[in-house]
Each structure stands twice: as C-alpha cells, then as structure tokens.
Image (cartoon, rainbow, N blue to C red):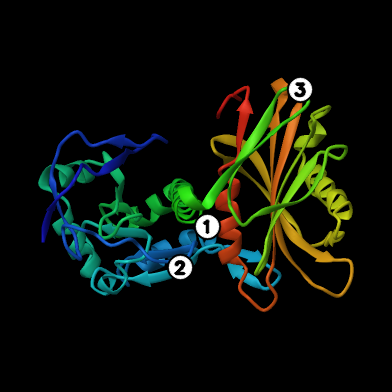
Amino acid sequence: MIIPVKPWRYEVRGTRYLSLVTRNFFIILLSLGCANKPFSVGDGGTLVVVADELDRPVLRKAIEAKFGRIISTPQPEPLFNIVWVDGKTLTDRTRNPLFLMAASLTGQGPTTDLLSRMLTPDVREGVEAGEYSIFTRCDPWARRQLLLLLVGRTRQELGRRMDGWVDTLYQRALDFEYERIVGELVKPTKHRRYERKLNDGSGFSLRLQIDYIESQGNDSLGFVRFIRHHPERWIMVAWGELDSTSHLAPGFIYNHRKSLGEAFLDPVMTYDDRWEWEETTLNGFPVILVRGLWATIGPIGGGPFFSYCLAIPEENRYYIIDGAVLAPGEAKMVYLWQLEAIVHTFERTSPKAKRQ
C-alpha cells in the first residue's frame, strides 16, 4: 500500500543534528490501514531490529553492546530487550513501539527489498551520494511508534555507519521511550504536578501519578521521597549546595545516596561493590548517572536504584533525582523504565539553567 506521509527526517553525514528532507515523497510501508491507526502496545525497553540475516554480523556487536547492555537488578537484565526480525517477519511486530531498521542498497533479502520500495529515486540518489544515512519516521504503523532507519551503500559501509551512529540512535530511542511511557503513565486525569520551593527561591517540579504519595521529607538533609505500592517504587529528589567540584564526582553521588538511605524512615544500605556510573543527559542538561543495588537493613529484601546528579554552578546547587524498586520475584526493568520516564519530567522552576 502506498501511503502519503510527511517527509522523512534524515541526518546529514558529519553532523549531530536532525534536519528535514525538503522534498515531499511517498513511502511504501507495511500497514494495518491508512486511517484510524491503533496505539502501539508494549512495555518500555523492547527494540525490534529489522535486518537481513546476512547483514546481522556487521550490526550485532554495536547494537547489543549499546542497547542490550546488562543492568544488575540484581539478576542480570538487558536495558533493551532486542528482538531480531527481517522485512518479511516484521509483519508480526507492527504494534511494537520502537524499531531500528538497518539495510544496504546492495544487499539481498526481504529487508533490502523493503528498503528499495521505501525510498523514492531522489532520496536513493542522496543515499548513493553519501548525503543521507539516518532517517526517522513517527507512527508508521501505529500511534506512539518510532522507526529509526540506517542505510549504507554496501554491507561493509552499513556496519561502519552503525558503529559510528549507534550512540545517536540510542539517545533517540531513549528520548522516544521516556516520552512515550510518560504519555501512558501520566495522563491528564491521573497525575499531579508536584512543586517544591527551596529557601533561595529556586525549586523544582515533577509530574507524578496520583497514587504516588509523599512518604518522607527532610529539609535539614535536603530530600523528599515518594512511594507507590504494589510493587513498591520510590522516587526521591535531593538537593544541596555545590561547594566544590567533588559534588560532580560519581563517588560523591554514590556516597551521598548511601547516607540518605541510612536516614530513611525505613533505613537501607547499598552494596559498595555493585555500582557503576556513566555520563548522560537529563532533559538536555549534562548529568552523571549512578546505578546500584540497595537492601533493607533486615530480612525484607532489596533491589536496583539509579541516581541522576544535576549540577547548577551558577546557583551553587546540585540535585540528585533517584528511583528505586522492590519487586521480589519479578523482572525489574519494566519498573525502572517507568521510574526513569517520570524522573525525566523533572524541571527546575526558577531560574532556568543553561542547556547543553
């Protein structure tokens, strides 16, 4: 079926920013129908990779290292559950939310065949000239859906482009998943906006589901904590004065989170040999992300936590936005995705910080 759509977005080789294709064209897509598309269905963190068998060896390492990296919850769980299909078996997955399609112009297989029907002659010429390599398309088969497309002229170039662009694809996938999950969880009639003013006039806000309740606030230690039951999930925001660059160090973030846990009404510990960190962004701000494991001081149990640290030098302040899960016997990543999506609604209310 030929479907008239808005232009694909493409990424020009050598840049880091997405631009719009200026030429309108038609695209051939597998479709459930042109009108009244259903909503996509799926929990956070499932990535459907559409690639032919012969192309997968040059793609798999980069994709699995970035999207499939293991998170200790404490059982090992992948950040993204990766499902491999091709242009033919894709028809069984068109209700999934997130897709990454990779194909070369000269390959052989159903994915390359699908690609050849998707690109109009002028866009194909741009790919052959090396001008275009990445395309994105929203809602191709269902609403709240994203298709990322990486194209190479040959299989070898496809592999090199995946190695070079996997970070960009990963960040785009994360942004989409957080936005999609928030749209499902924080519906207008089922959420509230929590705002807190600090003593210097600055402050922050979060969008929370209405069944999150404030379980503890401690102004002297500078934190507020929320809980949602069945299973237990916590969101915490902590703040403090940024009196040295040590507050930007992963070790400070972990140790400060550890000391706050000891001050909870239900004190918890953290495992000093089971944490890691990375540099990332939170709503455009550069942050340090720490992941680790916590446990109750007693026989109840424990689980994973994460802490984003945002430093605001011009205000001499830092924030730690934290999530934790207690779900014995269950997979934890589905709840971590929900918590991280809500954490990405964090906003400083005043004044505005400089974005990256």
Which badge, 2 or 3, comes first in the chain's sequence? 2
Q: Name the image quarter holding the C terminus.
A: top right
Decide: is 292 above or below 231: above
Q: In this view of the protein, which residue sits in the foreground, 17 or 301?
A: 301
* Residue 66, disc: 1
**Residue 303 occupies which quadrant of the picture?**
bottom right
Q: Name the image quarter holding the N terminus.
A: bottom left
Q: Give the farthest residue toward the bottom.
A: 329
Q: In this view of the protein, which residue sits in the foreground, 212 or 77?
A: 212
- Under mark 3, the amino acid is Asp
| Residue 116, position as x, y percentages in the image | 16, 58
Q: In this view of the protein, which residue sits in the foreground, 68 or 295?
A: 295
- Under mark 1, the amino acid is Lys
**Residue at the spot of label 3:** 200
Disc 1 to disc 2, C-alpha distance = 11 Å
- Under mark 2, the amino acid is Ile
**Judging from the image, what secondary structure is the residue with disc 1 in?**
helix
| Residue 239, position as x, y percentages in the image | 77, 36
**Residue at the spot of label 2:** 82
* Residue 289, disc: none
| Residue 333, position as x, y percentages in the image | 59, 65
Is 108 positioned to the left or the right of 198 in the image?
A: left
Q: Which residue appears at 42% of the width and 66% of the height?
A: 42
**Residue 55 occupies which quadrant of the picture?**
bottom left
Disc 3 to disc 1, C-alpha distance = 40 Å
Which badge, 1 or 2, comes first in the chain's sequence? 1
- Are circles 1 and 2 on residues that touch, CB within 8 Å? no
**Judging from the image, what secondary structure is the residue with disc 3 in?**
loop
